[in-house]
Image (tube, helix red, strand yellow):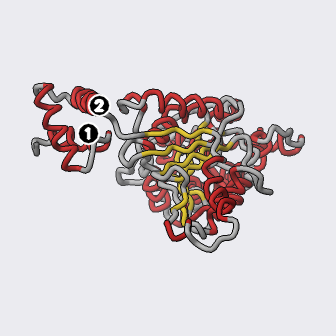
Amino acid sequence: MKKYEELHKKLTSLTVFRSLLEQPVMARLTALLGAEETDGLIEPYCALLHELYRTGDSLADRILSALAEDENIYVSYAAEGREAGEPIKSRLAEELAILGEAASLRCEDVIAEIGADIPLPRWRDGAPDVAAYYNGRLNRIATEGYGIFAAYHVFRADAEGRLLPVRRPDPQRLSELYGYENERRKVLKNTLALVEGLSANNVLLYGDAGTGKSSTVKAVVNELKDRGLRLIELQKSQLFLLPDIMDRLEGSPLKFIIFIDDLSFNSGDGDFAALKAILEGGVSSRGSNVAVYATSNRRHLVRETMSERDGDDVHLSDTLQELQSLSARFGLTVTFLRPEKDVFADIVLKLAEAKGITADRDELCRRAEAYAIRAGGRTPRAAKQFVELVRAGVM
C-alpha cells in the first residue's frame, strides 16, 4: 500500500518491541501495510479484521494490550529497578511513536486506499497517547505487572515448567464465604504482609475436607490481585520445578503465592525433600516476593503406618521427627475443622439468603442437617451443595 509504505518500514524496524511483530494482529497489520496493490488488498485486510475480532473491534486497544503484555529488555530493566542505557531509552521513545502512528490508523482511510467495490468490515478508530500509556504502565509495574503477568493473575505450570495462564479462574470472593472468619483473617493478614513487602510466612491450611481451605486461598488472591498479587498452582508431582520457577520470579516487582492443593507425602517420597529445601535452608530458597501456601487434610503432611513406627529403625524418634519437620517449616498453620451444628446452620442460612431463597429458616436448617448426615458430615461444601439443590428445586 503506497500510502502506508513508510509506516510499514517503521514497523519492520521495531527492535525493543520486535516480538510484537509476532502477535497475530500486528503480523496481519504489517502484512497489509506492506502488500502491493497488485497482490489484492482485500484478503490481507479481512485477515487482519478476522484476528482483531477475536478479542474486540478496536485496533488501538489491541496494540495497547500487546504493549502491556510484551516482555522486552526495557521492561525487564524497569522491573528490576535498573536504568537502561541511553541508546535503548532513545529507541524506546522512537518505537512508541511508531506504534502510536499504527494505533491511530483510521479505518476509512485504509479502506479508501484499498479501493474496494464491495462492503468491508470495520474496526473502531482510536487515537491513544501510546507513550503516556506505556510510561504509566511502567510507573505501576509493581501492581499491574508486565508480560504474561499483566494479562492474567492465576497460572499453572506445564511439564517443562512453563507458566500457563488460567483464563477463567475461580471468581470466589471473601464476601461469598461464610464462617471461619478468624481463620481467613489470619491468611489475609499474612498475604497483605507479602503484598506490602513485609516479612510473610509460608502458610499451611490444615483441616477436614470441604471446609474451604482452597477457596480461602483463591478468594484472598482475587481480593489482592489489583495490588500486584499473582497465584501459581503446582501439583505435588511438579515440586521438582520449584527451583526454576523461583529463579524466574526473582527480581519481579510483583508478589506471588505458590499454591499446592491437597498436599501429602509418603515417607519415602523424594518430593518431600525438595519442598523442605525450598521452605527453609536450601541453596535455592524462596525470594522475598514469594510465599508457599499449601492445603492438606494431614497435620504432618506425611502418611505413616503402624508398621513404620514398629519397624527396625535404630533411631526411630529421629526419623519421626524428620517426617514431622516439614509442617513445622510453614511459619503459619491455620486449622479448618468441621463446623458445629449452629455454625453450619448459619452458613446455610447466609448462602440461602445470597441465592434469594426464602424458605422457612427452621425447615431449611432441618433439611440441611439431614443432607449433611447423608453427605458425610457438616462442611461448608455440603452447605453450598444443599443450597444449590434447593435453588434448583431438587430438594
Q: Does 327 sit left or right of 374 as displayed? A: right
Mark 2 vs mark 1, CA separation in Å: 7 Å
Check contact, mark 2 vs mark 1: CB within 8 A. Answer: yes
User: In which quadrant of the rendered view does residue 318 lie?
Assistant: bottom right
- The residue nearer to you, when weighing 175 against 148, is 175
Residue 29: horizontal and vertical position, in percent?
56, 54
Find disc 2 in the rendering and name its residue: 347
Q: Residues within 10 Å of mark 2 (few under 14, many from 20)?
A: many
Q: Left or right: where does residue 159 sit relative to residue 112?
A: right
Determine the residue positioned at 77% across, 56% down. Answer: 282
Q: Amino acid at mark 2?
A: Ile
* SS at badge 1: helix
Name which of mark 2 and mark 1 comes first in the sequence.
2
Q: Amino acid at mark 1?
A: Ala
Residue 107's disc number: none
Residue topped by disc 1:
383
Q: Which secondary structure, mark 2?
A: helix
Residue 362 quadrant:
top left
